[in-house]
């Protein structure tokens, strides 16, 4: 039982550190103006992306898509509604100067 608890605690530590590292990467990319938030609740490159930025976008969006799908199924809400609500919440919490894509596809700063 003690080994199980130790393994579970180790897993949680690795999970928390991994999530924190992703958040740091996302926040850094936002701060550098490399990525911005879209009206659909996903991130996108603001300019021609490097392979590193493309990988970050794919990783973040994959996680978000899975979570949005889970929420949509759990609540009986259309995926597009969940995405739009998530986008509104995320954009509200962004610091000033962050890039946000308008419904017309153009980038602007918050």
Image (cartoon, grey):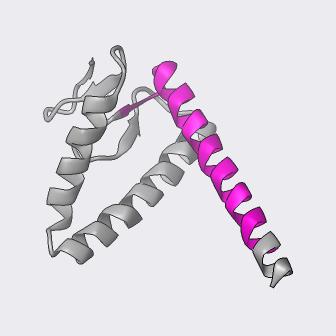
User: Considering the image in quadrants, where does the C terminus appear?
Assistant: top left
Q: Residue at x 30, y 38 (%)?
A: 90
Towards the viewer: 82 or 37: 82
Towards the viewer: 46 or 37: 37
Position of 58 relative to 6 (above/below): above
Q: Residue at x 39, y 28 (%)?
A: 46
Name the outermost residue toward the right: 3
From the viewer's perspective, is 40 left or right of 56?
left
Q: Residue at x 14, y 69 (%)?
A: 77
From the viewer's perspective, is 79 left or right of 98?
left
Can residue 38 be seen here?
no
Q: Position of residue 98 (x, y in %)?
A: 36, 21
Q: Position of residue 7 (x, y in %)?
A: 79, 72
User: Considering the image in quadrants, where does the N terminus appear?
Assistant: bottom right
Position of 47 relative to 66 (above/below): above
Q: Which quadrant holds residue 75?
A: bottom left
Q: Which quadrant holds residue 2?
A: bottom right
Can residue 93 be seen here?
yes
Report if residue 38 lies within the magenta region.
no
Q: Position of residue 74 (x, y in %)?
A: 25, 76
Position of 51 relative to 18 (above/below): above
Report if residue 17 lies within the magenta region.
yes
Q: Which residues make up the magenta segment? A: 7-36
Q: Position of residue 17 (x, y in %)?
A: 69, 48
Position of 11 relative to 48 (above/below): below
Towards the viewer: 50 or 19: 19
From the viewer's perspective, is 9 left or right of 74?
right
Instruction: Assign the magenta stretch its main secondary structure.
Output: helix
Name the outermost residue toward the front: 2
Q: Residue at x 29, y 47 (%)?
A: 41
């Amino acid at each position: 039982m003690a080994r199980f608890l130790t393994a579970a605690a180790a897993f949680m530590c690795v999970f928390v550190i991994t999530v924190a590292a992703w958040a740091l990467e996302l926040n850094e990319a936002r701060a550098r103006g490399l990525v911005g938030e879209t009206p659909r609740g996903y991130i996108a490159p603001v300019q021609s992306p490097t392979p590193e930025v493309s990988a970050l976008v794919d990783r973040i969006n994959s996680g978000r898509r899975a979570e949005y799908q889970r929420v949509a199924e759990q609540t009986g809400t259309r995926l597009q509604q969940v995405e739009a609500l998530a986008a509104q919440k995320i954009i509200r919490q962004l610091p000033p100067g962050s890039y946000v894509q308008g419904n017309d596809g153009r980038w602007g700063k918050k």
